[in-house]
Image (tube, grey):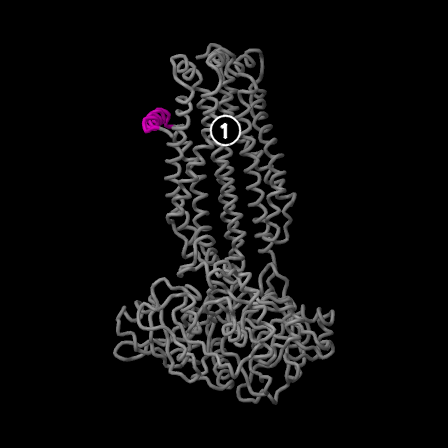
């Protein structure tokens, strides 16, 4: 262990070499800071437990299956009731659904405030017990609250309590109107409680009636707490034991045949891993990239230390002659490395704090789960300390061996040899340069592959035109709009009002927008001329209820046939022709051509009425830009249910397309909706282009982080090459002077110096290409239409590094070519 006196001496020596100290500390700060910043994100998103007591026992309960592209379904009321009653592995099981609701808050002087659309959680009372998180004030939800017909109650968040009630304790017992239902506030959750989502403001009881279940409606997520000693695998096996009993205990559409045909199986996963599953590999890849950047920075500083050690050979020889031991000389190098690494680590931690703040502020980071929980904590500080220690060991190892190794005679003899020395003298420095270039190429290749994926994603045609279009959502509650005709009348009135807004050219309404999963619906589809074999499950396809104006508003082209008619709220939909429109992918799948689909009949239930396909529209990438367009079915907005009763969806997306002139303002849009539905809030208003940005958010996030790391790696690598070449030029001053005195041209000298740098870089490129071919295999599933061995990406990365090496060596080369032979030979 270093003595305090050694560290003090190291500080004094570094003060006498400010340029060296500043360059080394800055390089280490960049490397350590980048690594700390990304580790902070990884720690907050992937490593830290969820903010609940004994969170490592919390699990997600779901099902896997293989059915027409579907791979997972959640719980139905029947599976929840049976699992909760008969399981042997949970202390308790809860069901929930994240939703949103129209909430009217109490206003001043007993009046009412405006209606807001707030994130809400429908939860069984057992959810709070599972999470072991009760309200800070009042009470939580009880079993009595979840009985059909029970008094309506609600629990609110601490943020809502402070914002809308001023933190007044008398808020308990006051009332909210939620989707038209008057509810008493019975509890206030503690600050920081964020379930199911951080945005949730209101929790409502989710009632289940065992006498009236729908076993095949998988609408609820499950959360459970494992008993002590039970693993997720054991819990999965226990629920798999219960799954075949569901059709027996709760007869319905989920039959034993359906379970077998779809290979349906229970699955229990740690709750912490569920939401971060899609981003975990991305974050580990980025952490690996910045770890490579830290190694590049350490190699750079190690090279600086080697140069410094070479320049102190006379000092070491004299000190050895005066009796200094090997340990004392090693302590010199290690002490300087420790001081510089500590300074670099401290500045790196400060840079990481600022960097994390910037990362969280980036719009694309909104798609990263738990990003709000990311912050500098004790674990991050410990990681920073560990990174600094590792950096100190790395950068001081070779210089310490050089300073403390060898005999006194060899040290003195080294002073007597020619200034250029032998090949062994420069081998370590060149090896470090080669290593820097190789690691930089791997990093550049990874960044380049993601950049190519990003470019390919941007070039994908989503199937709709996002330019000059605004979208927002409406939700019409059953209270106030009890009949389907009331919903249809309100929507038709709102569309007419919106069409009259200055700047609006077309208006459309649908239950779901592409690339947005809110209100998404899938349905079994039965084709008249493609009958489903007995004992098999029909295909499951997206089902979108839409007005005919939706297609021109979204610029989705009509490929064949025509669109169905506009909704008529005064007409009985049961007496109207049942017509649907399908996507081109749907038509191609069943009939190989769009025109061949016209006149065919489909239905959504085995015994329901047939609907005739009257039109085929262009494909839309509804599930992601990287996924093929689904075979979608578009159904008239105002239609009939399977029972024959009129039906209209209540959770709606509205698209307003601007004309070539001025765009309609958000205030004008809200005013138009208020005229048609005064008590219905407009929410999630945004340009349609944000759907595309959100779909690319994670790729953009990765490209930004890897791009920054690649740029820093190039800069650090260039500094390392410059330092080595500059030092070699200084060592070879006499040799270069002899060459110039004997008639060598300055251009020859420049080419000689640059050739050495490019040769070392080329060796690093060869090693880096081999490393990149191995390392980038892990990126296969994260890339879009780009192979990990993409030759264009590897070639560009190699050329960039060779060009960087040539540029970094140019300035030392130019300085060497301008030497005065007389001065060089004289040694002045």
Location of residue 319 by image quarter: top left
Is 592 situated above or below 321?
below
Expressed as whole percent of the image width and height from the top left, the position of residue 793 reads: 61, 44
Region in magenta: 3-18
**Would you say the magenta stretch is mainly helix, strand or loop?**
helix
Location of residue 403 by image quarter: top left
Q: Quadrant of the C terminus?
A: top left
Expressed as whole percent of the image width and height from the top left, the position of residue 299 reads: 49, 32
- Residue 669 visible here: no
How many other residues sit within 10 Å of disc 1, few (<14), some (14-19) or many (≥20)?
many
Expressed as whole percent of the image width and height from the top left, the position of residue 783 reads: 60, 52
Q: Quadrant of the N terminus?
A: top left
Quick one: SS at disc 1? helix
Q: Is residue 5 magenta?
A: yes
- Residue 20 visible here: yes
Q: Residue at x 44, y 66 (%)?
A: 196
Q: Is residue 454 magenta?
A: no
Expressed as whole percent of the image width and height from the top left, the position of residue 77 reads: 52, 76
Q: Residue at x 60, y 84 (%)?
A: 642
């Amino acid at each position: 262990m270093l003595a305090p006196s050694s560290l003090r001496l190291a500080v004094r020596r570094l003060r006498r070499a400010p340029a060296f100290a500043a360059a080394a500390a800055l390089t280490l700060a960049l490397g350590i800071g980048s690594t700390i910043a990304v580790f902070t994100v990884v720690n907050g998103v992937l490593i830290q437990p969820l903010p609940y007591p004994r969170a490592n026992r919390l699990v997600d309960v779901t099902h896997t299956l293989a059915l027409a592209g579907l791979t997972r379904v959640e719980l139905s009321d029947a599976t929840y009731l049976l699992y909760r009653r008969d399981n042997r592995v949970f202390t308790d099981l809860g069901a929930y659904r994240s939703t949103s609701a129209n909430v009217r808050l109490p206003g001043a002087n007993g009046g009412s405030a405006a209606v807001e659309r707030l994130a809400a959680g429908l939860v069984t009372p057992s959810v709070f017990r599972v999470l072991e998180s009760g309200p800070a004030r009042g009470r939580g939800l009880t079993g009595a609250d979840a009985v059909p017909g029970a008094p309506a109650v609600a629990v609110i968040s601490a943020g809502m309590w402070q914002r809308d009630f001023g933190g007044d304790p008398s808020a308990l017992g006051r009332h909210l109107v939620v989707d038209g239902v008057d509810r008493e506030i019975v509890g206030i959750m503690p600050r920081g409680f964020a379930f199911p989502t951080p945005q949730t403001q209101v929790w409502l009881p989710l009632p289940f009636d065992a006498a009236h279940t729908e076993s095949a409606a998988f609408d609820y997520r499950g959360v459970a707490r494992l008993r002590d000693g039970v693993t997720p695998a054991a819990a999965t096996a226990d629920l798999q034991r219960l799954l075949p009993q569901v059709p027996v205990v709760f007869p319905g559409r989920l039959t034993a045949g359906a379970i077998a045909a779809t290979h349906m199986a229970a699955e229990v996963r740690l709750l912490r891993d569920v939401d971060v599953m899609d981003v975990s590999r991305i974050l580990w890849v980025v952490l690996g990239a910045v770890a490579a950047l830290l190694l590049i920075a350490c190699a750079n500083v190690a090279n600086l230390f080697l140069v410094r050690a070479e320049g102190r050979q006379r000092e070491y020889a004299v000190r050895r002659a005066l009796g200094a031991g090997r340990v004392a000389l090693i302590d010199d190098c290690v002490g300087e490395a420790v001081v510089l690494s500590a300074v670099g680590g401290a500045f790196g931690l400060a840079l990481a704090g600022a960097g994390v703040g910037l990362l969280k502020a980036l719009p694309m980071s909104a798609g990263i789960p738990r990003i709000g929980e990311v912050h500098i904590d004790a674990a991050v500080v410990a990681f920073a300390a560990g990174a600094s220690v590792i950096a100190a060991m790395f950068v001081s190892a070779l210089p310490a061996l050089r300073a403390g190794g060898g005999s006194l005679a060899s040290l003195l003899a080294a002073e007597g040899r020619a200034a250029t020395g032998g090949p062994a003298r420069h081998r370590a420095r060149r090896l470090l340069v080669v290593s820097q270039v190789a690691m930089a190429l791997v990093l550049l290749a990874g960044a380049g592959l993601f950049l190519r994926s990003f470019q390919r994603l941007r070039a994908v045609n989503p199937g709709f035109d996002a330019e000059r279009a605004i979208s927002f959502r409406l939700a019409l509650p059953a209270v106030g709009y009890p009949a389907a005709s009331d919903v249809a009348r309100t929507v038709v009135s709102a569309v007419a009002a919106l069409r009259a807004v200055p700047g609006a050219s077309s208006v459309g309404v649908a239950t779901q927008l592409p690339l947005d999963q809110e209100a998404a619906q899938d349905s079994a589809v039965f084709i008249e001329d493609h009958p489903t074999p007995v004992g098999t499950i029909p295909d499951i396809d997206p089902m979108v209820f839409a007005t005919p104006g939706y297609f021109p508003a979204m610029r989705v082209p009509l490929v064949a046939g025509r669109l169905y008619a506009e909704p008529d709220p005064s007409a009985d939909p049961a007496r109207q022709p049942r017509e649907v429109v399908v996507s081109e992918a749907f038509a191609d799948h069943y009939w190989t051509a769009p025109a061949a689909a016209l006149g065919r009949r489909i239905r959504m239930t085995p015994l329901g009425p047939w609907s005739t396909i009257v039109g085929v529209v262009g494909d839309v990438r509804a599930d992601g830009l990287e996924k093929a367009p689904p075979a979608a079915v578009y159904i008239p907005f105002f239609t009939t249910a399977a029972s024959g009763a009129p039906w209209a969806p209540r959770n709606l997306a509205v698209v307003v397309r601007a004309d070539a002139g001025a765009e309609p303002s958000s205030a004008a849009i809200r005013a138009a909706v208020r005229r048609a539905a005064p008590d219905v809030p407009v929410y999630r208003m945004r340009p349609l282009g944000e759907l595309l940005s959100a779909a690319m958010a994670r790729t953009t996030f990765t490209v930004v982080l890897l791009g920054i790391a690649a740029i820093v790696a190039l800069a650090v690598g260039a500094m390392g090459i410059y330092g080595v070449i500059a030092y070699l030029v200084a060592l070879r001053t006499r040799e270069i002077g002899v060459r110039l005195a004997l008639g060598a041209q300055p251009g020859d000298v420049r080419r000689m110096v640059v050739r050495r740098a490019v040769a070392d870089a080329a060796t690093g490129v060869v090693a880096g290409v081999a490393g990149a071919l191995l390392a980038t295999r892990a990126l296969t599933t994260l890339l879009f239409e780009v192979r990990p061995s993409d030759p264009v990406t590897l070639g560009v990365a190699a050329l960039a590094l060779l060009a960087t090496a040539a540029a970094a060596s140019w300035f030392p080369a130019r300085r060497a070519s301008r030497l005065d032979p007389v001065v060089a030979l004289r040694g002045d």
